[in-house]
Image (cartoon, rainbow, N blue to C red):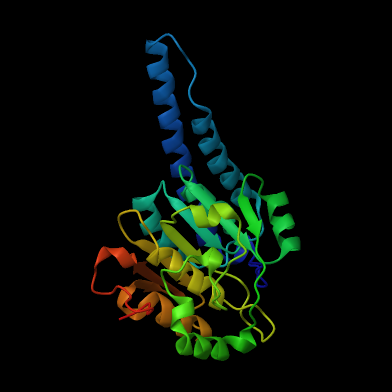
Amino acid sequence: MKNNKRLPLSESPWLVRSLVGVIVVTVAFLSLQMWQGKRDGLRDGCTSFSGQQWLQGEVVARALVHYATSKIVPQQNRGEIDLSLKVLSVRSPCNFLVFGLGHDSAMWNALNAHGNTVFLEEDSNWLREILKSQPGIEAYHVRYETKMSEADALLRNYRRSRSSCSPTRPLRSSKCELALANLPALIYETEWDVIMIDAPRGFFAAAPGRMSAIFTAAVMARSRKKEGSTDIFLHDVDRRVEQMYGREFLCSSNLVGSSGRLWHFRVPPSSSGGSSNSTDGFFCP
């Protein structure tokens, strides 16, 4: 998501140092892995190691160069980034889906360098601009059909017809107004371990708002077949719609952490049998 408040490096030196520090440590770790692979290869009479290792190293190196030379820093603050980092440090390599593309994208990509990180962006022009400055990022354009001015009506409609918006109904065939049914196939075919909702825009009446992103992320988590829960981060919770939809679909009972304007939910799949599971078309007990 395009950030309208771009902070120069001189105003946030702590964040730049933190980002570079984290990425440097990751580079060192990857370098050690590749050195170990090369050393083991020498024992076997072969000096090659996988292209995947080179790719991971390149992802981190690109992020390091990007933040070391950029005049713009990510829109989340240090505490918010640390909250997500704690989860990624445990779950990575993982499948990480990010709603929004911006100045923090290279960082998220690097922090999950061994995993699969995909971004969804509403603004096609902004998408091209970011991909030009941050090559190697996997991102797709998504079209939202909602508007912020419709947020209250959409929630009322959902509550009147929960059966069409069931948490277990496949998104691609869903008739629910809140479901994102036009995403690339790989988004539906992948089980996401971590989801970051930091887009689309939601600060004016004609903006798409995050209603569909929150609902779609909740359905993805509830439909999970793999073991374990889905960690979902929701940003800008100082705003009414984010709070309202977060509590409705991600559930207050699943809220496990927060920092600044970021909430962290741990959402179990509907099949887990946990006490917070949805029943009869409800997302929350």
Residue 250 in the image: x percent, y percent? 40, 75
Of residue 146 and residue 25, the one placed in the foreground of this image is: 146
Q: Quadrant of residue 265?
A: bottom left
The image shows residue 18, relative to residue 210, as above or below, that is above
Q: Quadrant of residue 150?
A: bottom right
Residue 107 visible from this viewpoint: no
Q: What is the residue that sits farthest to the right in this orientation?
A: 125
The image shows residue 157, relative to residue 77, as above or below, that is below
From the viewer's perspective, is 24 left or right of 36?
A: right
Image quarter hosting the C terminus = bottom left
The image shows residue 92, relative to residue 163, as above or below, that is above
From the viewer's perspective, is 264 left or right of 237?
A: left
Of residue 85 and residue 184, the one placed in the foreground of this image is: 184
Image quarter hosting the N terminus = bottom right
Q: Quadrant of residue 252?
A: bottom left
Residue 249 in the image: x percent, y percent? 42, 77
